[in-house]
Amino acid sequence: MNIQNIQPVRLTSLAHGGGCGCKLAPSVLQQLMAGTAPGGPYRQLLVGTETGDDAAVWQVDDTTCIVATTDFFMPMVDDAFDFGRIAATNALSDIYAMGARPIMALAILGMPIDKLPAETVREILRGGAEVCVSAGIPVAGGHSIDTPEPIYGLAVVGTCKPEHVRRNTGARVGDAILLTKPLGVGIYSAAIKKGMLPEKDYADLIATTTLLNRIGADLATDDAVHAITDITGFGLLGHGIEVARGSGVNLAVSVAALPLLPQSAALARAGCVTGASQRNWASYGSSVALPPDLPDWQRHLLTDPQTSGGLLVTCAADRADDILRTMIAAGYPFARRIGQVEAGPARIEVRE
């Protein structure tokens, strides 16, 4: 078979889902993980699978931790170069969310080689490599297989000092809650599949999904920052609940304060909602208190799967304004203060 002669097709037409919307529903993942054996009492394993954190952390010595993660998915956009960029940015985010800086990546590639021309695959790889260059790291190797649907992502290794590790379990009562990027990525990707997303709004989507969350490594050096996680496939509520449960606190989030991609509310009203949003709510809705009469389209913004989404950060309330200004100055114009951490049951309380 000569893959050079295969005609181009829409990438999204080859995938049953796209981006972080491909993730297993939280309830399904919980069932699967419940049957796995514990990893054992490794003293140097500071972070494993116990709290659903963003990456594994292994302490090498008194001054160095190795942070490792892997993330891959099917295309949410049709442009091969953009798909590669988004997937790589998303994978690197897990490292930054732990307070670390990446040092190298390995490519994960699965392609239906009988359906995609070689140039398309090269563009995907080029997009991922370009993002890694911007992060200052090499793609040092990888692995590829022939798959029914296109898949791309990275395994990433990073490092940080032990005192700079930030988890999704460190939120404290009284903390402010900050978010670095706008919500609505899944809604925009649903609009793409329906042919409803204008070019200008596509540019907004690419701008946010290819913005590296590198500020996480800087925030982790500040003792006032207590918890960090990134918002991906489980949506704001799903990853927020992991923080609430891991920290034993209540997260109070204001709907009015949430940063949104410009057309996300209108598109949600028009029915551009992913199946993953529905599965997310079915998985964790019992741990969320919503305002009375909150419309479904607004709830979908809260459960919308974010591909390469922002960092959810909790920090000392008296430092929140300073930290927010730092985020905006560092190139995160949508960064907002969206709520506070309160004593109470481990859940999320959504307020107007």
Image (tube, rainbow, N blue to C red):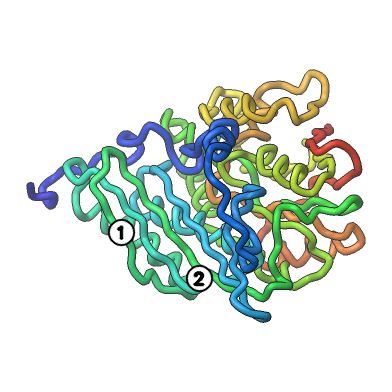
Q: Residues within 10 Å of mark 2 (few under 14, many from 20)?
A: some
SS of the residue under disc 2: loop
Residue 179 - label:
none
Left or right: 329, with 352 as reference point: left
- Against 198, residue 210 (above or below) is below
Name the residue that disc number 2 marks: 135
x and y percent of residue 81 in the render? 36, 55
Q: Quadrant of residue 73?
A: top left
C-alpha distance separating marks 2 and 1: 21 Å
> 176 or 184, which is in the foreground?
176
Kindly check if marks 2 and 1 are in contact, taking CB atoms under 8 A apart as contact. no
x and y percent of residue 251 in the render? 81, 42
- Against 108, residue 101 (above or below) is below
> 64 or 331, which is in the foreground?
64
x and y percent of residue 327 in the render? 72, 63
SS of the residue under disc 1: strand
Q: Is residue 262 visible?
A: no
Amino acid carrying label 1: it is His
Left or right: 1, with 291 as reference point: left
Residue 143 - label:
1
The residue at the point 19 percent across, 46 percent down is 113
Q: Residues within 10 Å of mark 1 (few under 14, many from 20)?
A: few
The residue at the point 80 percent across, 33 percent down is 350
Viewer-nearest of discs 2 and 1: 1
Q: Quadrant of residue 159?
A: bottom right
In the rendered image, which quarter contains the C terminus? top right
> 90 or 254, which is in the foreground?
90
